[in-house]
Amino acid sequence: MPVTIKDVARLAGVSPATVSLVLSNKGQVSEDTKRRVLEAVQKLGYRPNVLAQNLVKGRTNTVLLCAFIREDRKLSTFYGELINSLLTAISLSGYYLQMVVKGEFFNGHPLDKREALLEIAKNRLFEGLVLLSHWPVQYAEVSDLVREKFPFVVVNQRVEGEGISYVDIDHYGGAKKAVEYLVHQGHVRIAHIRGPREHRHAEERYRAYLDALVEHGIPVRREYILEGDFRRLSGRRAMEELLAVRPLPTAVFCANDKMAIGALQVAKERGIRVHEDLTIFGFDGIEAVKYTDPPIPTVEQPLGELGKMAAEILVKQIQGGEGKRVILGCNLLLWDGFLVKGDGKGEKTQEGGRLR
């Protein structure tokens, strides 16, 4: 059984209240009493219950990650990496992190999400809230949190309105970098496997694809644009359709890495030399693209920085500071020796296939 404060008091020959005074370094306690209490603590290996102490003070030192994502699917690699980075950052700040998955509210009543968040704020069981949602968050859904002056930060999307803090990624800028890179490599027949239309980040990446082509004077070909659902199988289906189009594209920009992996599998099964005859480019920067054959160049989302920044903003609010809004940029992860000119015959700079 765990050692309690009563066990310490019994061994030291004092009351539990006296032990509390010694451990908190408060009140008038004689040096002899302090010595006996500390010796008893050391001998018994007593460790104070920090959570219980904070509850007495009206604090829990715990923040809640409320995730509005599908409950019927496994957490994606994206969510897993983001949650892990957030957990690490929150822990280093001296707080505990508790997570609750609220599931799908997208097709439910529009007040469901608002009522769930208001209940969290009113119960005051947590010091603050991190809000992660697969579906768009509206100002009306978090306005009660603002009114209650409850510390919170929205992560991985932007919500405009007074009193709202958020950390998001520049999906448009990252996607545009990728398409422009392909253009600079000589590609003009660039296809796009886009994400679902209802997903805000998918729309931003799609808009960046269109803008990059138009700005470089490249015609937009509707037959080069297919829609997936961010899963590998939809990438396979889209690539099968693209390979029936004439002329064939020389590059495919995929809205996420899972669809890029599916596209790569189909291309290889059809005997296409990737990235010699066809370049496939992803988005996310998940670990798996480093180990495909060949590796897939991608847009890397700074998930570690995303979680760290969200934790920093939330902790600052909990401690009485102001909120903040941050947009993080993306990097391109390019594999030397694989990206070639758009005609599939350009020179390659072979450097062992390393990441640069």
Image: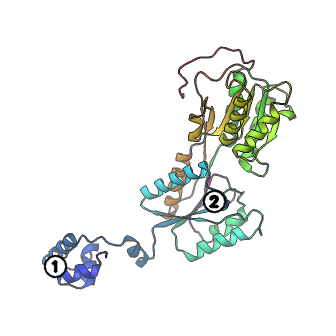
Element carrying mark 2: loop
Looking at marks 2 and 1 on the same chain, the residue that comes earlier in the sequence is marked by 1
The overriding secondary structure of the stretch rendered in magenta is loop
Residue 119, quarter of picture: bottom right
Element carrying mark 1: helix
CB of mark 2 within 8 Å of CB of mark 1? no
To which residue does mark 1 refer? Answer: 33
Residue shown at the point (28%, 76%) measured from the top left: 3
- Residue 299: percent from the left, percent from the top? 63, 36
Picture mark count: 2
- Residue 149: percent from the left, percent from the top? 59, 69
Q: Does the magenta portion include 147?
A: no
Residue shown at the point (60%, 42%) measured from the top left: 301
To which residue does mark 2 refer? Answer: 164
Residue 162, quarter of picture: bottom right
244 sits left or right of 338 in the view: right
Q: Quadrant of the C terminus?
A: top right
33 shown above or below 346: below
Q: Quadrant of the N terminus?
A: bottom left
Q: Compare residues 146 and 33 and report the one nearer the observer.
A: 33
Amino acid carrying mark 1 in the image:
Thr
Q: CA distance from mark 2 to mark 1?
A: 51 Å
Q: Which residues are magenta?
A: 149-166
Residue shown at the point (74%, 50%) measured from the top left: 200
For label 1, count other residues whose C-alpha is less than 10 Å away and answer few (under 14), some (14-19) or many (20+): some
For label 2, count other residues whose C-alpha is less than 10 Å away and answer few (under 14), some (14-19) or many (20+): many
Label at residue 252: none
- Residue 235: percent from the left, percent from the top? 73, 40
Q: Does the magenta portion include 162?
A: yes
